Amino acid sequence: MRKVINFGTCRLLIMVVFSCFTTTVAGQSTESDEEASYKILEEVIVTAQKRGEESLLDTAMSVTAISGDEMARRHAQEMNDYLRNQPGTNFIERGSGRNAVIIRGITSDPGRGGVITGVYIDETPVHGLGWGETGSPDLKLVDIERVEVLRGPQGTLYGAGSMSGTVRTLTRAPELDRFSGYVKVGGSSTSGSGDLNYEVQGVANIPVVEDQFALRAVAYRFDDSGYIRNVAGQDPAKLAAVDLFNARLGGAVDDRGATVTEGFRLGALWRVNDRLDVRLTAISQDTDQDGVPTIDVLQGPFEQSRFARLDGTEESLKTDLELYSLTVNYDAEKWSLTSASAWIDSTASIDWDVGLFFLDALEGVEPPYWLYQADLNDVFTQELRWNWDPGGRWRLLLGAFYEERDLSFVQTLNFEGSPDPFGGFFDNDEIVDSEAVRKSLFADTSVGLTDQLEITAGIRSYRVEGGGFGSLPEDRQSGETLKAGLDWRPERSFLGEGPLIYATWAEGFRPGIVVREPPERCDPDGDGIIDEVGLPWENVDNDDVSSVEIGYKATFAQRRVAVEAAAFKIDWTGLRIDVTVPAPCASTLPFSAGIAESKGFEFALSALLTDDLQLDLSASWLSAELAEDGLLGPAGSRLPGSARYNASLGLEYGFEISGNDAWIRGNAAWVGDYYNNLEETPPRLGDYATLNLGGGVDFGRWLFEVFINNVTDSDALTWANQIWVPYDRETRLRPRTIGARLGYSFGQN
């Protein structure tokens, strides 16, 4: 049982706890690992640096790795269940396909403005496939190998969009030597306006030709109730619209936001010979959400007031993902060659009541306008990597990346009533097609100066063609990102067992937007100035980050204690924001907003207090602010969604019940406060604590688990979508959920 998660501040507490258990366990034995009779922390293997497998504690970057087994013990099913517990990390969930991952505070608006954090499924980048080209597919965590969270710019290895970091979900490959699988069913209940939730998942691993060819099939369905009630029938403003416009109200349903997710994964692994492996994976996941899961500020804590369309349909969100990947790996004695190809077909759509956007135009009267928007992506990616490692002091990685993305953006704005007060002026039916091609060459090398000292360097040269609003294929951008580092591995000393101290400078980038001309309704006089906001309509250049990070990793007490620490400073130039321009423009347009700075400290600790009791402790301190007066705020304004502090504490105890392995685990997390805008105007978000409890008994073939998520039933705000104050729409934590799960394993365990 081994997990490393990064931790920040609370130094006095750490020193006291650390000194107590290092003193206790260090005296238990001085035997070598091979002869020791006590347990040690398991070694965690990662592939974050694209050099093949390596120990997490030997990886000179700030990385968290969480195994699939640990995710299951935490009853973590999606990003929302684990990212907020990571140091320096926040997660904004506004419904299916409308999510945002914030690492080290690097964001200008988590719901808009393009991709800042990279998201990968195996070798394939999937960021920007959500609604509005910002969110990412949230693959259910069924039968995964692990999740890796890489903090800090990853521009040289992972390219565009990985400005703040990268989140990688690694699925389990087929096993060539055994037939095995499992089936799990579960149920739970969410309090308040929630309801019953159900899940079923199954996995089968089939070695077709032993030690040569195997298949692995995964299928699942999750039915998660909503927990928001539509109270339109009790809302005077909505009732007035019924009289004025013959509008139709949404039904009084308790579980708005109810979600059904169905998916399957089929993997094939062919070991051609001792050197050559071919892996093919097909993934499909469809998510249908019945209602947009946001509350209306003027209603109750878990209430919304929404229209329905005249045909009776109500708000909905949908995300559909199909991903096919082919990975070929040839491993020679001193070098390896990897080819990773992927084909993606994805759709993310929203159908919602947007009458609030027209309040000013009708002097406070809300008309029944409905907006349907969909992003349809067709993507092909190809990466080729050559790793050279002869076993000496020099290692080299060379790579090439190619991506071709076709995007169709569909938008329909309709008045769902009569008469239309604007005479059909705002009715809109629009399809915008764009194409983008990205090409990159990258290199990463490490040279050992001595047995303890190593230098690293990396570069990525990129070119982007097309892809912006109104851009053409001949619109091109190009540039380079760099990385340099120094790693020191001193001999065993007071710094710990096998300590690693590293210093890294790294860059990241996000491509700019080439624009042709503003919509006519936004610039009726054609002077290039958007009238409602007084800003020029012009190209938005790349925004870039550069980061300096100093880190430390080591174990103590014969590998019963693991410690990690990192301090960093990130400079962000040309940060891009999207500004919502009111009617008659009624569009969201991109602008450049200035310079920002993020700095912080993270610290992590994992320890076996006894052979059966493990402690995981993490925290971070973060300051992410505008470095100079910008478009939407003065210098010192905090970046949206960036909590100054967060912390987590996990305790897991293993024991036996009638000779059967059992465990109980508790996870507590605290997220500091943050805002949804650079002006830091209310509401203040975050500043909440959550507690999750779980346990289980493994009877061999049978597995029984119970869990309680959000034990204290916290209703804290996690995000607020600014419409027009006080008409904002907000997102809250899911209420207390209590459930159980039963699993049966077959074949060779």
Image: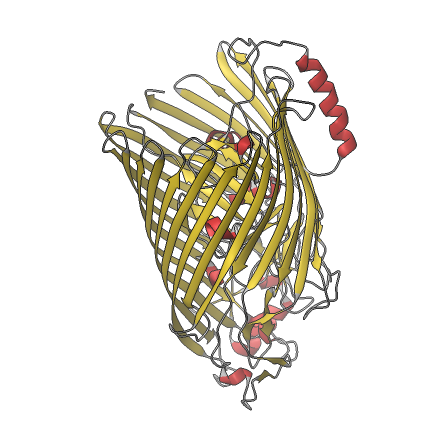
Image height check: is 186 above or below 437? above
Image height check: is 158 above or below 539? above
Image height check: is 300 above or below 77? below
Q: Residue 329, located in which quarter of the rendered image?
A: top left
> Quick one: quadrant of the C terminus?
top left
Q: Percent x, y for residue 185?
A: 41, 32
Q: Percent x, y for residue 414?
A: 46, 75
Give the left or right position of residue 738, taking residue 345 as reference.
Answer: right
Of residues 193 and 105, the one drawn nearer to the viewer in this rendering: 105
Residue plotted at (28% across, 27% down): 176
Q: Percent x, y for residue 597?
A: 68, 57
Of residues 377 and 446, the one drawn nearer to the viewer in this rendering: 446
Residue plotted at (28% across, 35% down): 277
Of residues 537 and 510, the one drawn nearer to the viewer in this rendering: 510
Residue plotted at (58% across, 9% down): 31
Count of marks placed on residues:
0
Give the left or right position of residue 102, taking residue 468 as reference.
Answer: right
Q: Percent x, y for residue 148?
A: 50, 39
Most distant residue in the bottom direction:
525
